[in-house]
Image: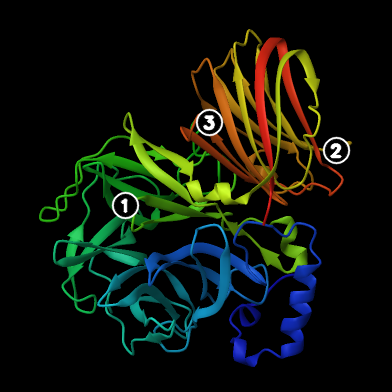
Amino acid sequence: MEWTQEQRYRKLEDVKDEEIQGLAKLVNHCPWRQSFHIQPITGLLNDPNGFAYYNGEYHLFYQWFPLGPVHGLKHWYHTKSKDLVHWENVGMAIEPTNEYDSHGAYSGSGIEHDGQLFLLYTGNSRDENWNRHPYQCLAVMNQDGEITKMDVPVIRDVPSGYTDHFRDPKVWKQGEEFFTVIGAQRENETGCAVLYQSTNLQDWQFAGEIKTNLDHFGYMWECPDYFEMEEQGVFIFSPQGLEAVGNHYQNIYQSGYVIGRQLDLVTKEFIHGPFHELDRGFDFYAPQTMQDPNGRRILVGWMGLPEIDYPTDKNGWAHCLTLPRKLSIKEGKIIQKPVEELTLLRGEKTESDKVVNNESIAFKGFEGEVYELLAEFSASNAEEFGIELRVGENERTVIKYNTVEKKIIFDRTYSGVSFAEEFGSIRKCDLDSETVTFQIFVDASSVEVFVNDGKEVFTGRIFPGKESRGINFFSHGGQTNVKAVKWEVAV
């Protein structure tokens, strides 16, 4: 179905209840609804927004178009959790209602201040000639969960030298001042990020462009996020327009980070190292981080990408969010591990310890649609070894290590219903290690693979048949010791 502009920008108040109920019914009959990931009740989910700890709970919002699996009039939807595992749908948080966000409440972030949660977001508006006018807007949530939008934008204008691609404010506090970094495009159509500062979250001054050594690195930087960890500065962003190089930048758009000295808030200079992709899989974009009361830096990403059709579209919904990941730094790179609380999902446990010799075999009790799997491969003289997941008659998702190329390979060529084929069905990254561990979270239509305690991560949506439940372990061209533990997911 082709969506017209008019259909994409209908207001919810103009939609009959029967249409919403019909859409919900269509969604609920989808065979690929997730069991332990955040997903939309109907329609399309994209960027995580406003991720914060407030009033004793984790609050996570996301971009939401409720009426179908397309990018239309964006709202903020609100979900919350006490443990980062069990999420409660709260409902609509920010609805486009005025001239400043008339064509969508776009992405932004949250911060606690004076006992309230301040939500800074981009209001997207269009004039009669369809020219875009972005505004940075503010909404405030009180302890009762009531959200009030400010009547006027807190940042009204785009500074000189930048185009109307100017969005996604990420706010933080340093000392007595607040700062926000905003993704931007220079007038020469190169991507960058700019900085604003404020003493009260309502009156903002333009501080200047963040000076990096990435002057010609894509045409737009979306969803910037700056924070400091282990006395270093970390800048995460999603550059659009990078050309694929070898095994890098294979997706339509990328998300990654640079690490360096702490950002100089006076000169705006950020001295940093090379750009690294955060996730080496297929479906990951627009991540956002927060710091929780225990001092952990936690990241959640959108498990999807713009401008790609997904098999769930015909069921009236699209996309989910990744599991929360705890970040740390090791040897100049970010390490990402699933947050410890995810062990709360662990139900019935099955274990096996075998030598696999030039064969592909199933271990007793290892099968299913939804589970956590931990596998360690060691003492190998094989050419390659790994796991096949969601195995059926003609379906399988393969995660393996090639000892000759020294590469991790994630292959979804035969994972089920195929999509985004123009971007390939295999992802690879370098890894030189004698022992390889895969911690894998398999949901109804997704796989998240944490390699060697979070040194690399692969995320991918898959759409297999329900009968594809097998798990095989293999070693080709030699033998490998395999220790495996599987937990049923107890939602």
Give whichever of discs 2 and 1 has the lower sequence position. 1
Q: Secondary structure at mark 3?
A: loop
Residue 107 vertical position relative to residue 143 in the rendered view, above or below: above
Residue 17 vertical position relative to residue 183 in the rendered view, above or below: below
The one of 88 and 203 positioned closer to us in this rendering: 88
Q: Give how far apart the Cα atoms at labels 3 and 1 are.
A: 34 Å
Q: Which residue is mark 1?
A: 295
Q: Nearer the viewer, mark 2 or mark 1?
A: 1
Residue kind at label 3, given as amino acid type: Asn
Q: Quadrant of residue 230?
A: top left
State the image coordinates of residue 108 (x, y, percent, origin top left). 39, 68
Count neighbours of disc 3 (C-alpha within 10 A) and say few if under 14, some if 14 to 19, many if 20 or more: few
Q: Are marks 3 and 1 in contact (CB under 8 Å)?
A: no
Q: Which residue is mark 3?
A: 247
| Residue at x 14% of width, y 50% of height | 264
In this orientation, does residue 339 appear?
Answer: no
Q: Secondary structure at mark 1?
A: loop
Residue kind at label 2, given as amino acid type: Gly
Q: Residue furthest front?
A: 348
State the image coordinates of residue 74 (x, y, percent, origin top left). 53, 75
Q: Nearer the viewer, mark 2 or mark 3?
A: 2
Q: Nearer the viewer, mark 3 or mark 1?
A: 1
Give whichever of discs 3 and 1 has the lower sequence position. 3
Q: Which residue is mark 2?
A: 392
Residue kind at label 1, given as amino acid type: Gly
Q: Secondary structure at mark 2?
A: loop
State the image coordinates of residue 222 (x, y, percent, origin top left). 41, 57
